[in-house]
Amino acid sequence: MRYDLPIVKVASAEADHFVWYENGKRKIGSAKDYWPSVYEAYDKFYAPAFEYLPLPYDPLHFGEKLKELDKISSADAIEALDLTPYQKEAVHSFAGINAHSNSKNCSYLDQLRWLSLSAFNKDFLWANISTYSFKHGTKDLIDHMQADSKAQLKKGSAVVKVEQQKDLVIITTNRKEIFRARAVIMALPLNVWPDIEFKPGLSSIKQAASKEGHTGSGVKTYMRIKGRLPITFCNGPQEMPYNFLFTGYDDEDQILIGFGGSPENLDVNDDEEVEKAVHQYLPEAQLLESFSYDWNLDPYSKGTWCTYPPGMLTGALKELQRPEGRVYFAGSDIADGWRGFIDGAIESGAQTAQLVSEKLKT
């Protein structure tokens, strides 16, 4: 809204062809065939959301009460529900892809947060997380933000040391460059915090949480296929190479987008393996090319988007947000609201900038 950037609707929002796996068997049908049973299961999974998280941007409002759900994994919560085996499999798949991992690795409470942020409406949740994208790509937003900030952007230098001395913070890069500042905001992904030397060291809670890391570790692939197939939405068990696959763009050649919970289930750099994974849903698809990026191997991310493992939301979030001296912390991974999304990064950055501004005034 700030930059009036055009957005587009993902093609699968109007899907007329659904493919899913039910009790190990491939099924084909319409939205009316797929969604009712799945939504019934989602309702039971998300049932505690309003009771525990009525204030979506104050996720710790109820304090101690929240810990019982936070220490439970999504997988354990699902297995305790009165659902059919297929419905459990469908919710495991959804919880797993939200965490970009396996449902056993993520906190149940952190999963409930997604529905709370979507006004406790499942359709609104889907609209939030997968229906709209920037017409000219995310880079369009980043370029506008950078130009708006008037900040100096320095590329190719990784910070390796952050040292506080009296009224200054001294930054050292891997190129032996030295920068001095009255305050520093660190907005790096949580999983790379342990790679930086802090003097004095960070609190024990920050160190433990960043060492444990968030759950995001799956794969995402864009695939161009020949010709035009029906606009498709596909879903399968979380153990499949792609447990969600859908039509992203419907042009002369369609673009499919696939999400999977683990790079161990698929070599995204092997087009033959990618095509085999697509054929599990769409055997008629002919792959022309595919593109993926393994964020797990990137030393400056070491993972994908952030969802918390059991115990981290109630046990570490507030401490992860807390400044230490003149070092402040920000970024999507420690946002109160849409953690793991650009929206969360903006929220966290705005709050932290205000704290730093007030500090510098004094």
Image: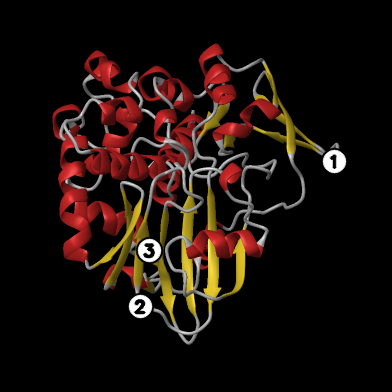
Q: Nearer the viewer, residue 44 or 352?
A: 44
Q: How many marks?
A: 3
**Residue 275 image offset from top left, x and y in percent:** 57, 65
Q: Residue at x 73, y 53 (%)?
A: 155
| Nearest to viewer (mark 1 / mark 3) | 1
Is residue 185 found left or right of 56 in the rendered image?
right
**Residue 265 image offset from top left, x and y in percent:** 56, 45
Q: Which residue is mark 3?
A: 2
255, above or below 308, in the image = below
Is residue 108 found left or right of 310 in the rendered image?
left
Q: Which residue is mark 1?
A: 175
Name the amino acid type tagged 2.
Pro
Is residue 164 found left or right of 280 in the rendered image?
right
* First reached walking from the N terminus: tag 2 or tag 1: 1
Name the amino acid type tagged 3.
Arg
Q: CA distance from mark 1 to mark 3?
A: 36 Å
Q: Residue at x 39, y 34 (%)?
A: 103
Whether residue 145 appears in this view of the structure is no
113, above or below 155, in the image = above
State the mark number for residue 230: 2
State the mark number for residue 299: none
126, above or below 119, in the image = below
